[in-house]
Amino acid sequence: MIPYGRHDVSQADIDAVVEVLRSNWLTQGPMVPRFERGVADFAGAAHAVASNSATSSLHVACLALGVGPGDRVWTSPNTFVASANCALYCGAEVDFVDIDPCSYNLSVERLSEKLATAKINGTLPKVVIPVHFAGQPCDMPGIHALGREYGFRIIEDASHAIGASYLGTKVGSCQHSDITVFSFHPVKIITTAEGGMATTNDPDLAERMVRHRSHGITSMPDRMRPRPADEVWNYQQIDLGFNYRMTDLQAALGLSQLGRLEQFVKIRREIARSYDEALADLPVILPWQAPSTLSSYHLYPIRIRESLCGKTQRQVYDALTAAGIAVNLHYIPVYRHPFYEAKGFKVGHCPEAEKHYREAITIPIHPTLSISEQELVIESLEMIVKL
């Protein structure tokens, strides 16, 4: 089967991990700070805080911004559940803003409408989490402007989007947000096996995230409670935190992969251009790209135009799978999961996201995808959807 996504681990990556295995530090050593500095410098942010997953990074980002019981967090329904679950972990309520029909990202227009109503009802969100779906950046200047107007904070869920940019600025620079979160799962742009990273330009937010990812413990003298002169203290727990630390093994892999990040994104963009050209005349909707953005193309989602090809999404999905192509679906709207339906969310809450869910199929795109595999994907899709 040709997978829709796949990691690319080189001998240099393996050597970097082995070097750590032979060192004195497997965790809490020097590699994590080096990886953090590397990501911060790449993105153009002042600080970066690594964790054991992007989900953990989203959680500590919410905690750093003071999200708690009685607060509201809004996000996109077209995302993995972690984008919403992170708020529930903090005891907050979650709601969803429908997506833009072109970018499949959170719609600034729908957000503006929802905020105006929420202001009247006294139900404004404390935090909004836009998601850079498939690597295509959101309209962050527009979301940031609404944040200033309505007083909410912003966490960019850039799990798909390291290496992407908008208006000439890399995603992760936090010019239009408080915090940006990246994922390093094996199908993402670069990998640490599992892992996440949060960037920010606010030193206080960075410090809080560091503390929350490590049991709520601090070793900073000015943060610790005064102690008797005859007692020795190296650290104190001052918050209820979590063990979300990244290991030095993961960081070594991530730092090695970071050196190839731009190459990985270049290959993904080349594959996307090949698909754009080869599939242009088929009865499918191809990913739209805003003129002011450069996607990192974590995913290449197409949408099936059933009225033009006479095939349902399910029929195309099954036929591609039978041809040896492991396509996927990104995503079922978060509120359509049974857990969220049990909270009272109903069909029709975000119509555009539901339409996307009924039509979308993700076809393979990753740096190890060969020319012959790309050709098989294209030829198979042509045979299936042409009348």
Image: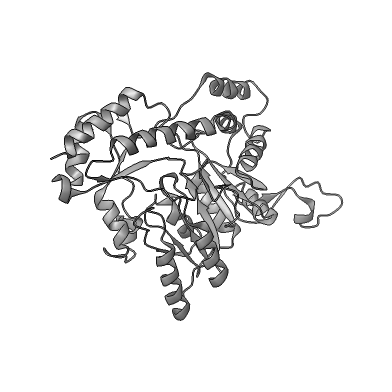
Q: Residue at x 47, y 36 (%)?
A: 189
- Residue 5 seen from this side: no
- Of residue 5 and residue 145, the one placed in the foreground of this image is 145
Quadrant housing the C terminus: top left
Q: Is residue 149 left or right of residue 135?
A: right
Q: Is residue 306 above or below residue 143?
A: above
User: Whole-percent x and y of residue 303?
Assistant: 27, 47
> Residue 201: x, y in percent?
66, 53
Q: Position of residue 181 (x, y in %)?
A: 53, 48
Please tell me in which quadrant of the rendered image residue 145 appears. bottom right
Judge whether residue 283 can be spotted in this image.
yes
Please tell me in which quadrant of the rendered image residue 102 appears: bottom left
Left or right of 134 in this view: 150: right
Q: Position of residue 108 (x, y in %)?
A: 44, 63
Of residues 211 and 79, the one nearer the viewer is: 79
Number of marks present in the image shown: 0
